Image (cartoon, rainbow, N blue to C red):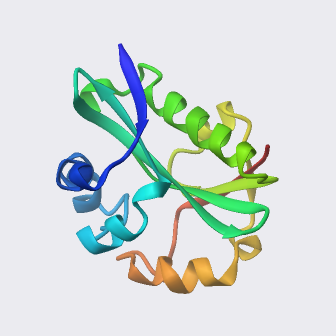
Amino acid sequence: MIEYTKAKLSDIREMQEVVKPEVEKGIILFRSSDEMATNIRSYILAKREQEIIGFGALHFHADNLAEIRSLVVKEAFRGQGVGKGIIGNLLEEGRAMGLKEVFTLTYQRAFFEALGFHEIPKEKLPPHKIWADCIKCKHFPVCDEIALIKTI
C-alpha cells in the first residue's frame, strides 16, 4: 500500500537520493538541502513500507497560480499510479488553498495530458520562474521541456 504524506525535514537526505539519478540525467534540477528545507512544506511524499518511492512539490507563484515541480518516482515503481497519486494530492492541496491553475515544465507530456493538462507557450510562464529556476538548468537557454497547465 502506498501512503501519501507531507515531507519532513528528516526526509531531505532520502529525497535527494531518490531524485539523484534524474538530476544526473539533467531531467530534474538539483535542489540543495537548504533549498529543500526552505520549501519543505511544498513536498508530498509517496511511501511504501516507510521507504520514499517518489515525491513532488507544489510551488506557489501567485495567489491563483502554482507549479508542480520536482516530480520523481523511483524507476522500479513507475507505471503503477504513484505519480498520478502524487499529482492528485498536490492538486487537492492547491484547490484547498484557492488556486485556479497549476502549471508544470516537463519532458513527460503524455503523463500530464492524461491528467488534464494542456500545452501552453513557455512565454506564458511567470518571468520569475525563468530567472529563479531555469537559469540553473544545464539546458538553459535552449530548453526542450514542455509547459503544460491545468485549471483546477
Q: Is residue 146 left or right of residue 98?
A: left
Residue 29: where, in percent of width, then height?
Answer: 36, 66
> Residue at the spot x=52%, y=45% of the render?
108
Residue 47: where, in percent of width, then height?
Answer: 31, 29
> Residue at the spot x=39%, y=81% of the render?
136
Q: Give the vertical position of 62 relative to 149 (above or below).
A: below
Foreground residue among 151 and 141 = 151
Foreground residue among 63 and 135 = 63
- Quadrant holding the C terminus: top right
Q: Quadrant of residue 60?
A: bottom right
Q: Is residue 73 visible?
A: no
Q: Give the vertical position of 18 relative to 121 (above or below).
A: above
Q: Is residue 10 left or right of residue 120?
A: left
Q: Give the vertical position of 22 relative to 29 (above or below).
A: above
> Residue at the spot x=74%, y=62% of the render?
65
Q: Is residue 17 visible?
A: yes
Residue 21: where, in percent of width, then height?
Answer: 21, 51
Query: Number of callouts in the render?
Result: 0
Foreground residue among 122 and 99 = 99
- Quadrant holding the N terminus: top left
Residue 95: where, in percent of width, then height?
Answer: 74, 44
Name of the residue lying farthest toward the top: 1
